[in-house]
Image (cartoon, rainbow, N blue to C red):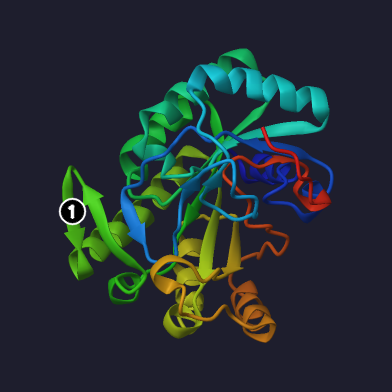
Amino acid sequence: MLNGDIIELSQSHPCYSTQAHHKIGRIHLPVAPKCNIACKYCDRKVSPYYHSSRPGLAYELIKPEEAILAVEKAMEKNPSMAVVGISGPGEPLYNQETLETLRLVGENFPDLKLCVCTNGLLLPEKARILKELNVKSLTLTINAVDPEVASKISSYSIVEGNILSGIEGAEVLVSKQLEGLEIASELGFLTKVNTVLIPEINLEHVKDIAYEIQKRGVFIMNIMPLIPLGEFKHLRAPTCDELIASREACESIIPIFRACKQCRADACGIPGLDSKDKI
């Protein structure tokens, strides 16, 4: 895919373009429950009783075949629906249901753009499969490119059935993430990197992340504030000044997306309109 094609694609994706963010609809299909890393800020929940808006939440899990009906309903409610994404509530590439859902949606709705959000651990081995399924865009969550910093954010990684903790697990995670970005760039994906800003841990590290992802062809970066949960519930969220400063520092390196709503795994509607719709 040529650079011009990537720009054109980005302009119609509400998670890449501020203008599209207020005009274009998207739906997240919650088909992926399992995760292969343990982020210390993560608190995944599947329940009809959790009504807040943040990643890792879903009212219910759906099966791949149920996703078709969910997309149909979403398109009826919102004619501007253009993007179908899978972002959890676990790690999409760690769940076979993700690939089956992408296949079914692609067959039934060939005009919709397919998108996957991933931690990147399995991206090197799954990228070409995603390309074959006509996935157009990828969002990776990368919170560090230094394994020592990464080890403070994620407790362990599951690699080929083995649990790797500490520096060992972080080294594999960072290596796979950066390798995955290189492969994604070669294959022509539109890519975005989400970075959770954690003041006590990676505040001074975000520029290093920006440099490394820019070198690997990432189109845009999204620096998000920590939501203190899980093992990090005792930590503070970044101040507005810290968030602004981090974004401005990285913007000299790579474009920055500022409209992120930190959406649920079952979000549906136009993000910029603060839609309360759910699938």
Residue 196 higher or lower than 114, as above or below: below
Q: Quadrant of residue 83?
A: top right
Residue beneath the point at 18% across and 53% down: 163
Q: Quadrant of residue 114?
A: top right
What type is the residue that disc 1 sits on?
A: Ile
Residue beneath the point at 55% across and 53% down: 55
Residue 81 horizontal side relative to residue 105, left or right? right
Residue beneath the point at 52% across and 65% down: 195
Q: Residues within 10 Å of mark 1 (few under 14, many from 20)?
A: some
- Residue 186, given in percent of the width and then of the height, sits at 45, 43
- Residue 268, given in percent of the width and then of the height, sits at 70, 38
- Residue 189, given in percent of the width and then of the height, sits at 53, 41
Residue 226 higher or lower than 44, as above or below: below
Quadrant showing the N terminus:
top right
In front: 251, or 72?
72
Residue beneath the point at 81% across and 28% down: 77
In front: 244, or 192?
244
The residue to which callout 1 is attached is 163
- Residue 78, given in percent of the width and then of the height, sits at 82, 30
Quadrant showing the C terminus:
top right
Residue 15 higher or lower than 166, as above or below: above
